[in-house]
Amino acid sequence: MADPHQLFDDTSSAQSRGYGAQRAPGGLGYPTASASPQSAFLGDPVSNMAMAYGSSLAAQGKELVDKNIDRFIPVTKLKYYFAVDTMYVGKKLGLLFFPYLHQDWEVQYQQDTPVAPRFDVNAPDLYIPAMAFITYVLVAGLALGTQDRFSPDLLGLQASSALAWLTLEVLAILLSLYLVTVNTDLTTIDLVAFLGYKYVGMIGGVLMGLLFGKIGYYLVLGWCCVSIFVFMIRTLRLKILAEAAAEGIPVRGARNQLRMYLTMAVAAAQPLLMYWLTFHLVR
């Protein structure tokens, strides 16, 4: 019986019964959430195949790059030329300044492969030439700064000139070896290493010039020029005259004479370039 004083009918129980009847069978009355787009994408077989194919292409590309990178950049060979330690650097610098005291100039081999530079002071390396070149550029900037002539353009010109002369040297020697038909194990990287040792003497000459003037420059540079000349003669003689030395044939005949002249020309070019690249840095 309805209350006579009630103005409106109570319909809450009916709505509750209707809401309860409309509940979803699997939850608390809320609609079931649909799957996310990421889950749908990963669950698609076509997408899985595309991802697997892309991963396979990436792996094949990496393998192809690893196999062919040595054709353009000899990474394996470069690792050999940088296999040095502190003891080797000290001994090599001593050899460059005092080659007259060294007796055995033969490069050591192990199973037809030259040993790493850190085990043989006669082996060429790229660490000392690279560091010496960078130091030479820095010392050149210091010398120009003390003379109030420093500028980035002039320092860049100094570095590019040194690199250009080094490149011309390497190309000229390779062409000469080809024309003289020399069969040698001297590689292009070996040439860059041997020719780059002159930067060590150039650094010493410029530093002494900054400290003691022209007299110090000429004294130290002169000593370094003679040392690098002797070093190059004794080192390249075993490389360029390898066949004749191995067979015990005396250096006679036109072909061997040309080889000896080539060795002396390469050695004589080092002091000239050392002076040419440094004389204007000392006032």
Image (cartoon, rainbow, N blue to C red):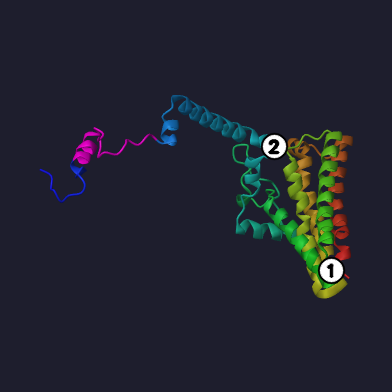
**SS assignment at label 2:** helix
Q: Nearer the viewer, mark 2 or mark 1?
A: 2
Q: Nearer the viewer, residue 231 or 188?
A: 188
In the rendered image, the residue lying farthest to the left is 1
Q: Residue at x 67, y 48 (%)?
A: 123
For the residue pair 131 and 24, the one nearer the viewer reads as: 24
For the point 59% across and 32% down, which residue is it?
61
| Residue at which label 1 appears | 217
Q: How far apart are marks 2 and 1 (CA)?
A: 41 Å
**Front-most of 154 and 228?**
154
Q: Is residue 18 magenta?
A: yes
Q: What amino acid is labelled 1 in the image? A: Tyr
Residue 233 rendering spot, x and y as whole percentages? 80, 50
Furthest-bottom residue in view? 212
Q: Mark 1 Cα within 10 Å, few/some/many (few <14, many 20+)?
A: many
Is residue 253 shown to the viewer in this render? yes
Q: What kind of residue is marked 2?
A: Phe
The stretch in magenta equals: 14-35
Closer to the camera, 53 or 139?
53
Q: Determine the residue positioned at 75% across, 56% down.
A: 133
